[in-house]
Structures are given as C-alpha cells and as structure tokens.
Amino acid sequence: MDLTVIVPTFNEGPNVAELLRRLGSSLEGREFEVVFVDDSTDDTPDIIRVVAAGVDFPVRLIHRDEPVAGLGGAVLEGFRAADSRWCLVMDGDLQHPPEDIPRMLDRAAVGDVDIVVASRYVAGGTAGGLANATRTAVSRASTVLTKSMFPRKLHGCTDPMTGFFLVDRDAIDLDSLRPRGFKILLEILARRQLRIGEVPFAFATRYAGESKATFTQGIRFLTQLTMLRFGRMSAFALVGGVGAIANLVIMWGLIRLGMGYIPAAIIASEVTIIGNFLLLEYLVFRDMRADSGSMWMRFIKSFAFNNVEAVVRISVLPLLVQAHIPSVLAAAITLAAAFVVRFVYHALWVYAPKRVSANAATPAVRESRSRTLES
Ligand code: GDD
Ligand code: MN
C-alpha cells in the first residue's frame, strides 16, 4: 500500500528533523511521501526545506500565505495534494508517535475499513501527553458530548477528537468538508458513515515548542459541533441567544442604575449589535467570509440592518408595555420575533458569495488533484 503522510504545521521548526528521522525509520522499506501543510509565521518552511534535502523519501512543502480554516483547512489541503489514496494525518510535534503507523497500516490492510483511528481511549491507549488535568477533563467531556450527538456515525470510534488517523481518501467527500479549527476527524466522520477501525496509541508529550490549542479553539469546536448537528441556523440562534441575554442583562443593569427603559434598551442594543456581528464573523459565518467581500461592507450591512430592526423593535416596546407586559419581557418578545428575519438577511445577503471560490488551492495543489482524477 502506498501512503501520503500529511503533517499540518504552525511554527514547529524544532520538531521537523526529529519527526522526519522517526518517520523514516518507522516506515523503512515502504513507499510513502510526506506532505507538510504549513501556516507558520516563522522560519519553519526553511527548516523543512533543509531537512527534507537530507532524507531519502519524498517530502513536499505546501506553505499557505493566506491560511484558510486553520489546522482543519491545512489537512483538507493535504488531502487534495496527496499522491496516494491512503492518507495518514498526524501532528508535527511528535505527540503522535510515528512508530504506531505500521500497526495502523496493518489494520487498514485487513481491507474492511475506510479509516483507522489511533485512539487514546481504547484499551491499551493513553492520553498521558495532555498538558494538564483540565485538558484531560475537557477532552473526556467533549468526547462524550460529541459521541452523544452522533451516536450512529461515531459508533465504533472511541476518540473522535484525535488528530492521528489513516483514511482512504476515496471514501470521503472532500467537497462536503467544512473544516473550522482543530477537529477535522470529527468533520470527516460526521459527514458520512464510514467503516471505522481503531488501534490504541499512547498520546505522548510534545517534543519541542508549545501547543497552539487555545480557548478560542474550544469555542470554535462547540460551534462546529452545533453546525454539524443542527445546521447553521442553530449556531446563529445560539449566538443570537447569547446576544439577547446580554442585551437584557445590560438593559436591566442600566435600569437598576436609574436609567429610563428606552435609553437603556438603546444602549443595550448597540453594545450587543457589535458583539453579535463579531461572533457571526468569527464563528457562524467564518467559512463564508473569504468569498463575501470586505468585512467592513458586511459590518455596515449588518449594523444598518440591526439598527433599523432595533428602532422598529424599540418603538414596538411602548405598545407592549402599555398592554401591561413588563418591559424586559416585552423586549424578550420583540427580540424573538426579530430573530428569523435577521437570520435570513444575514445568510442570504450579508454573507452572500461574491465570487466562486477556487477552493483556495494553489496551482500545485490543483495540478496534483487533476492528476488523481485522471488516474
Ligand atoms: N497548518 C496549520 N495551521 N497547522 C496547525 C495550525 C494551523 O493553524 N494550528 C495548529 N497546527 C498544527 C500544529 O503545528 C501541530 O502540528 C498540530 O497542528 C497540532 O497542534 P498542537 O498545537 O500540537 O495542538 P494540541 O496538541 O493541543 O492538539 C492536538 O491534540 C488533540 C487531541 O487532544 C491535535 O492533534 C488535535 O488535532 C487533537 O485533537
Ligand atoms: Mn500537540
């Protein structure tokens, strides 16, 4: 079986030589290539070029000057560029030991699965390399949550959050993947029912450098989960819900400070309009930003709409209050009514594609893709 090893890297210079050395000795005697998909802002690409020149297997470097969709987007780009049908995805920091790859290949060679997941949570595996108790707990909890949301598709996968897996590229529909952030495996498994095999592995500690996981990545993961399970409108609703609560809390606080309910509602709305826009940009419509023009245009459209909407909403408020509905409850009713209109407007107009995306592929990538199609 031939193999493409896909390694997403972000500032992993000090790990490159050791990674290639251990890959070389673990896969000795096999046909394989290594593809680095690199978004680094430091000298990692130079290091990769130098080290690659000294090894006896093919190493390719795809450096993205304008990275799309972070780690997940990098892996997708790797799939598109891969020369082999079987693709192994692994981190570049040696938390995924190259010595485990032969066992994964053996499992795939049995021929009854589309994907082999290296799992920390199957008998014989360990998650010892997670940085601390908090991360272990977060990993465990999000695994349970994720599995409960996709009970059928993730049946047979104990570790949908791992970044270490071997997949038959022909079994996945690359165009259906909407990677955002770290959890590309989840994206793959949730889109289409795959036949899953697992092998245990011990998640190691980082060889060098620092983890790029952040709190933002965690939030992005929750958005991804919501979108995969319930679609964009629920993610939009979630953001709207958070905004509405913030709106009401601010309004309530200002009234408590002695402000009239109308100015309180105005200030609360302006603050949440801006906050909401940022959440839409960075969470709900993140994947549509690149194709929908400038952020300023979107902000102006969104801001204008929300203000018109707020004016309408706030002028309806006195009517409801006169009908003896408490002011905060009345505000809640009008916010709920505005929700659907706002979603339709944003999905169809603010984030409407301005041009057809070329999948952000580099010429080299497109070339190897058409080669795959011909063969
Ligand atoms: N190209 C690219 N672009 N690579 C990235 C980016 C990015 O924006 N962000 C991170 N990476 C690379 C890192 O350089 C590393 O090789 C790999 O992705 C994983 O990133 P780490 O910073 O080491 O993350 P981690 O160790 O916290 O997370 C890993 O463990 C999780 C399981 O707990 C990842 O493997 C996750 O995929 C995995 O789910
Ligand atoms: Mn890591």
Image: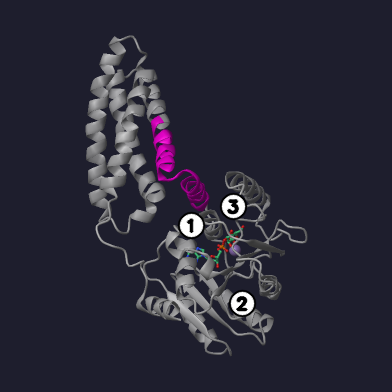
Left or right of 297: which side holds 148?
right
Region rendered in magenta: 215-244
Report how far apart the C-alphas of labels 2 and 1 lie in the structure.
Answer: 23 Å
Left or right of 7: which side holds 203?
right
Q: Nearer the viewer, residue 98 or 13?
A: 98
The type of residue carrying mark 1 is: Gly
Q: Any mark on residue 277, and which? A: none
Quarter of the image with the N terminus is: bottom right
Q: Nearer the viewer, residue 269 or 339?
A: 339
Report how far apart the C-alphas of labels 3 and 1 lie in the structure.
Answer: 21 Å
Q: Which residue is mark 3?
A: 153
The type of residue carrying mark 3 is: Lys
Q: Which residue is mark 2?
A: 19
Tell me the residue at 49%/63% (across/down). Answer: 71
Mark 3 or mark 2, which is nearer to you? 3
**Above-or-below relation of 8 to 231:** below
From where the camera sits, is residue 12 visible? no
**Above-or-below relation of 288 to 8:** above
**Above-or-below relation of 191 to 342:** below
Q: Any magenta on residue 313? A: no
From where the camera sits, is residue 247 visible? yes
Principal secondary structure, stretch drawn in magenta: helix
- Proximity of marks 2 and 1: CB atoms separated by less than 8 Å: no
Indicate yes or no: mark 1 CB to ligand 1 under 8 Å.
Answer: no
